[in-house]
């Protein structure tokens, strides 16, 4: 990875912002078309996997699914689940393999329109390009609810984004808010550390780790669920908002759900509705939320079984099985005194992209990037890695290749229609300044 000075001529056909799996996959595709480009990365390749994940985190997909264009998994544990450090190493090797022109330690501060292209101001100088690819991912910052500001003083608050390990938390009770994959994994880890844990549960997706002897991700891939395209979905906005499934990647390939947590001592409550006078007030919808998750789980498994029968695989699989309905306390708590029972509140309430550095009129009223399958509502501007960008698998590592294959064709067409002579005449030069060590998280991007 090149972390030195940018070249004096800071004009380039394409700037790719982000050196994760999507940015690297796009870099390879651009190189194969001989399109001049640079990849700007705020830290090292795979920065988020190195420094923005908790220590015990592993991928939710088995290793055999960890692939990028021209590079498949070749390790000795295909059915295992990579820890975050190995994901970062995998991406670094891939960057070297494809000779990606990565400029590390380069945070993007602002992107603005410039003639027929874009001006990209960074902590290491300025670039000018005819097309720009936003590949900073969907998990740039945590989504924290407004009621966080109502918590009593003295209670530690942190997000799943900022959590690292149990011993970094004070002793005492923990309220985990959110019951998707992150919330369940962290709640289990904290309960096992000896802290009493309560988990606030809203809408969630229950999913087994294994079904009929195969990883559930194998079923999702084999049955075509992960390849489902956005035009085949009636309400794509709703689908994009779905929480991540309740999965964990462990050496035991074990299922993780609310039943497992309760057997270990975690107490489930309803969705956190508000905080008032030092008390957390929970919704009474816990039973309904779990019943809906159970219903959707069984519908999914029914679909797997029907597919197995149609394809003739039925006879070669173990018998179908079903988990019992989620067991719940007879009378779930509706309130708890945070000052007496909790030392830490951990927000596992989701993540969101951070595109505030884009100084362009490309956002809807809710602040989301306007795009159609990754083609943003501005000439020569593209985005990768968002949930269900073009397919259900778009945000997965192995899903980047197909999206990139389609978007790079669109991008190349844009470049063919945009002559270099349309660029502004003034020269723009990148500098060799040291990386700004006091980056404004609200302005800088990968």
Image (cartoon, helix red, strand yellow):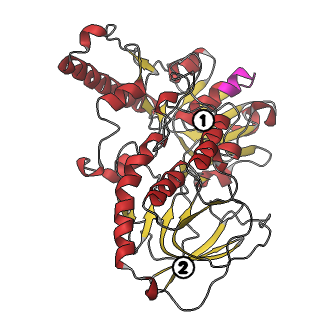
336 lies left or right of 200? right
Which element is circle 1 on? strand
For this rendering, which residue is in front, 270 or 246? 246
Look at the picture and state if 7 lies above or below 170: below
Q: Residues within 10 Å of mark 1 (few under 14, many from 20)?
A: some
Secondary structure under the numbered disc 2 in the rendered image: strand
Q: Which residues are magenta?
A: 189-196
Residue 34 or 43: which is nearer the viewer? 34
Give left or right: position of 54 versus 355. Answer: right
To which quarter of the image does residue 85 belong?
Answer: top right
In the picture shown, does residue 429 fall above or below 339?
below
The residue nearer to you, when weighing 258 against 35, is: 35
Question: For mark 2, what is the residue?
Answer: 112
Which circle marks residue 335 in the picture? 1
Q: Quadrant of the N terminus?
A: bottom right
Q: Is 190 included in the stretch rendered in magenta?
A: yes
The picture places residue 347, in percent across and down from the top left corner, at: 63, 43
Residue 150, above or below 266: below
Residue at (73, 69) in percent of width and height: 5
């Amino acid at each position: 990875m090149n972390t030195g000075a940018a070249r004096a001529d800071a004009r380039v056909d394409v700037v790719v912002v982000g050196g994760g799996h999507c940015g690297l996959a796009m870099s390879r595709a651009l190189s194969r078309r001989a399109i001049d480009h640079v990849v700007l990365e705020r830290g090292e390749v795979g920065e988020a996997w190195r420094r923005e994940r908790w220590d015990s985190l592993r991928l939710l997909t088995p290793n055999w699914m960890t692939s990028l264009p021209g590079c498949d998994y070749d390790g000795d544990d295909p059915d295992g689940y990579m820890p975050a450090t190995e994901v970062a190493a995998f991406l670094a090797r891939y960057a070297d393999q494809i000779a990606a022109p990565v400029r590390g330690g380069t945070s993007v501060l602002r992107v603005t329109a410039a003639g027929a292209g874009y001006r990209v101001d960074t902590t290491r100088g300025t670039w000018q390009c005819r097309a720009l690819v936003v590949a900073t991912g969907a998990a740039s910052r945590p989504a924290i609810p407004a009621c966080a500001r109502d918590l009593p003083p003295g209670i530690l608050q942190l997000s799943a984004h900022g959590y690292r390990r149990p011993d970094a938390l004070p002793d005492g009770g923990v309220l985990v808010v959110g019951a998707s994959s992150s919330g369940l994994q962290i709640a289990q880890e904290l309960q096992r550390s000896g802290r009493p844990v309560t988990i606030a549960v809203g809408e969630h997706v229950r999913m087994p780790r294994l079904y009929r002897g195969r990883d559930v991700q194998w079923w999702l891939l084999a049955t075509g669920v992960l390849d489902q395209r956005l035009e085949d979905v009636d309400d794509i906005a709703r689908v994009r908002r779905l929480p991540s499934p309740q999965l964990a990647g462990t050496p035991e390939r074990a299922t993780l759900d609310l039943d497992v947590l309760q057997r270990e001592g975690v107490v489930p409550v309803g969705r956190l509705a508000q905080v008032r006078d030092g008390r957390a007030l929970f919704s009474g919808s816990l039973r309904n939320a779990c019943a809906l998750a159970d219903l959707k789980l069984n519908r999914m498994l029914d679909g797997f079984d029907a597919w197995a029968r149609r394809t003739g695989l039925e006879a070669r699989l173990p018998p179908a099985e079903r988990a019992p309905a989620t067991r719940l306390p007879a009378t779930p708590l509706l309130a708890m005194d945070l000052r007496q029972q909790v030392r830490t509140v951990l927000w596992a309430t989701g993540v969101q992209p951070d595109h505030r550095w884009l100084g362009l009129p490309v956002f809807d009223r809710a602040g989301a990037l306007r795009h159609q399958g990754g083609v943003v509502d501005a000439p020569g501007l593209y985005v990768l890695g968002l949930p269900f960008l073009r397919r259900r698998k778009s945000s997965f590592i192995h899903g980047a290749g197909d999206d990139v294959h389609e978007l790079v064709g669109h991008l190349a067409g844009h470049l063919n229609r945009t002559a270099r002579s349309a660029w502004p005449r003034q020269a723009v030069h990148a500098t060799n300044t040291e990386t700004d060590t006091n980056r404004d998280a609200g302005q800088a991007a990968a």
